Image (cartoon, grey):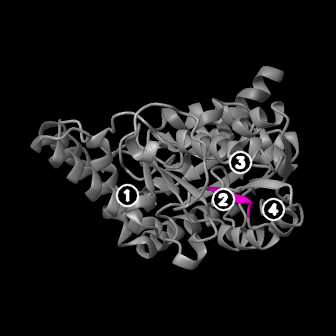
Amino acid sequence: MLFDPSLHYLDNAATTLVAPEVAEAVRAAMAEHWANPSALYAPAARSEAALSAARAVLAKTIGCSPGEVVFTGCGSEGNNIALLGLAAARKSWGRKIVASGYEHPSVARPLERLAQEGWRVELVPPAQDGRLPLDELLNRVDKATALVACMQVNNETGAQNDVAALAAGAKAANSRTAVHVDGVQGWLRLPPFTKAALANIDSYTVSGHKIHAPKGVGALYLRRGCSIQPPYLGGGQERGIRPGTENVPYAVGLGVAAGRLAGDIPARAAAAAGLNARLRAGLAAIPGVLLNSPEDAVPQVLNLSLGAGRPRSETMLHFLEARGVYVSSGSACSKGAASHTLMAMGLPAGRIDTALRVSFCADNTAADVDALLEGLEAGLKSLQANRGRHRG
């Protein structure tokens, strides 16, 4: 899929290349499904049919019914709609929110706003190994808890959380508590939820550009019967949850991308696991390198630190880029800021400042891993030598 085989793109947790068949589906839909799906004439009915077909595909990959899928502009928008809307619908009886302490900014920032509005927001940080103590989250759920939020897979370390068990426990503690799950990094990397598991999850967000669909499209699962006060006002599109004329071509593309990946989740996970193991083995041969991802993280993501006294993340990123190797220092939304996740894990500054995130997709190869390992070894030798000369 890579347009230039000399490039070694290993930042798929930030975004993915649009698959050729997805791009073609979007192009065709722009020409064929141009009508507003809310209108009453025949071309509009065809647009509505295309939208419904895409919705059905998404529902199958999540494990819900098509009527529970709301198209959004991205995962961040879905998180905002869910958190602000679920909280607003419960403020008459609950003023407490419990969440993990390493959520994506699109969850963390809305929680900060809710705290400013008088909500009591309790955050549970992960342990130093990256694992989240789910029991501690559950211990904080009480009769005043309106909302629980926890990501399915952490975007920086790949740590995965048993959100189905968390949701069941939260509902057992307080049946009125809403449970929101950011599924952007877990969707189509992990199997769909069972019907029983999804019954306890009130909302779940997904994003197109993480699965080889275009940027600018996502979806929100909203459990049927779940009470929500949408933050947007407008027409009645998407059940009134996300009003505005739907982006039919991108929704079609999202459906094609989801259908393309849904059938081979185990095979793609196995391929990523092989690349992950190859990278771990290579890193073990480089003295001083530390791994920040837990052993049971999803295989598509591996977070590492070069170690205190080594070149900072940004310096190494530019060195690797010059060699055609692309990784990141953490969340792409942080723009080079210190890793929120690694800080929440309580790691020392020297480890955080030298952290790199590597993330695979099914199109990556062993050559990509080898290019990264060669680049890291060359970078450590060259950059540290330069630092020594400058000090001299």
Q: What stretch is highlighted in magenta?
A: 176-181
Question: Tag 4: Cα neighbours inside 10 Å, few (<14), some, or many (≥20)?
Answer: some
- Residue that badge 1 annotates: 363
What's under tag 2, amino acid-wise?
Leu
Q: Is mark 2 on a helix, strand or loop?
A: helix
Residue 196 % position (x, y): 57, 78
- Residue that badge 4 annotates: 129
Q: Position of 208 compared to 53: left or right?
A: right
**3 vs 4, front mark:** 3
Give me the C-alpha separation between circle 3 and circle 4: 16 Å
Contact? badges 3 and 1 (CB < 8 Å): no
Give me the C-alpha separation between circle 1 and circle 4: 29 Å
Residue 59 % position (x, y): 40, 64
- The mark nearer the N terminus, 3 or 4, is 3
Residue at the image point whose x is 61% and y is 43% from the top: 229
- Residue that badge 2 annotates: 283
What's under tag 1, amino acid-wise?
Asp
Q: Is mark 1 on a helix, strand or loop?
A: loop
Q: Position of 107 compared to 198: left or right?
A: right
**4 vs 2, front mark:** 4
